[in-house]
Image (spheres, grey):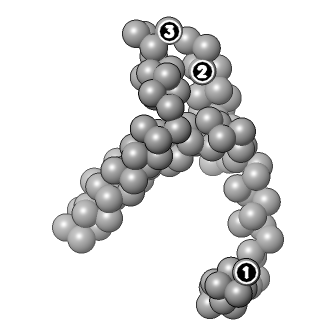
């Protein structure tokens, strides 16, 4: 199984859960709370991932990274984005120096 397939299946499930009962679905509950709450969860999971890294806990970084990626996908879906949108941007950046890419954004 390819990793991109896992992302696509999970994203499809996240989109499907949009119409689920918030009492029975964590994703539906997040959608019901709105974009600000979803964005807050992304921030929380990002911070937890960073803290796990500072503690040099590989297993916790794996666990928290999975939570972060999951919540990012909920955010993407809520904003009408798909993994393909993110993959396209990563593809666009491929071969660019990270410094050059950052400088190009600073000039906008």
- Residue lying at 76% horizontally and 52% vertically, measured from the top left: 85
**Secondary structure at numbered mark 1:** loop
Q: Give the residue at mark 2.
A: 18
Q: Is residue 62 left or right of residue 59?
A: right
Most foreground residue, 37 or 7: 37
Q: Mark 1 or mark 2, which is nearer to you?
A: 1
CB within 8 Å, label 1 to label 2 = no
Residue 6 position by quadrant: top right
CA neighbours of label 2 inside 10 A, class few (<14), some (14 to 19), many (20+): many
- Residue lying at 45% horizontally and 14% vertically, measured from the top left: 22
Q: Give the residue at mark 1.
A: 108
Quadrant location, the C terminus? bottom right
Is residue 28 placed above or below 104 in the rendered structure?
above
Numbered badge on residue 50: none
- Residue 84 visible at all: yes
- Residue lying at 60% horizontally and 21% vertically, measured from the top left: 18
**Secondary structure at numbered mark 2:** helix
Most foreground residue, 85 or 38: 38
Query: Distance from label 1 to label 2 (Cα)?
Result: 35 Å
**Secondary structure at numbered mark 3:** loop
Q: Give the residue at mark 3.
A: 21
Residue 58 position by quadrant: bottom left
Quadrant location, the N terminus? top right
Measured as percent of width and height from the top left, residue 23 is found at 40, 10
Is residue 101 placed above or below 89 in the rendered structure?
below
Q: Is residue 37 left or right of residue 17?
A: left
Query: Distance from label 3 to label 2 (Cα)?
Result: 8 Å
- Residue 67 visible at all: no
- Residue lying at 78% horizontally and 67% vertically, measured from the top left: 91
Which circle's residue, 1 or 2, is located before the other in the chain? 2
CB within 8 Å, label 3 to label 1 = no
């Amino acid at each position: 199984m390819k990793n991109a397939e896992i992302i696509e299946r999970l994203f499809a499930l996240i989109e499907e859960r949009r119409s689920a009962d918030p009492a029975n679905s964590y994703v539906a509950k997040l959608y019901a709370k709105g974009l600000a709450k979803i964005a807050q969860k992304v921030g929380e999971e990002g911070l937890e991932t960073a803290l796990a890294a500072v503690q040099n806990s590989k297993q916790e970084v794996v666990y928290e990274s999975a939570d972060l990626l999951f919540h990012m996908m909920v955010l993407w879906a809520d904003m009408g984005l798909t993994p393909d949108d993110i993959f396209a941007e990563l593809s666009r950046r491929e071969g660019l120096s990270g410094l050059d890419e950052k400088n190009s954004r600073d000039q906008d």
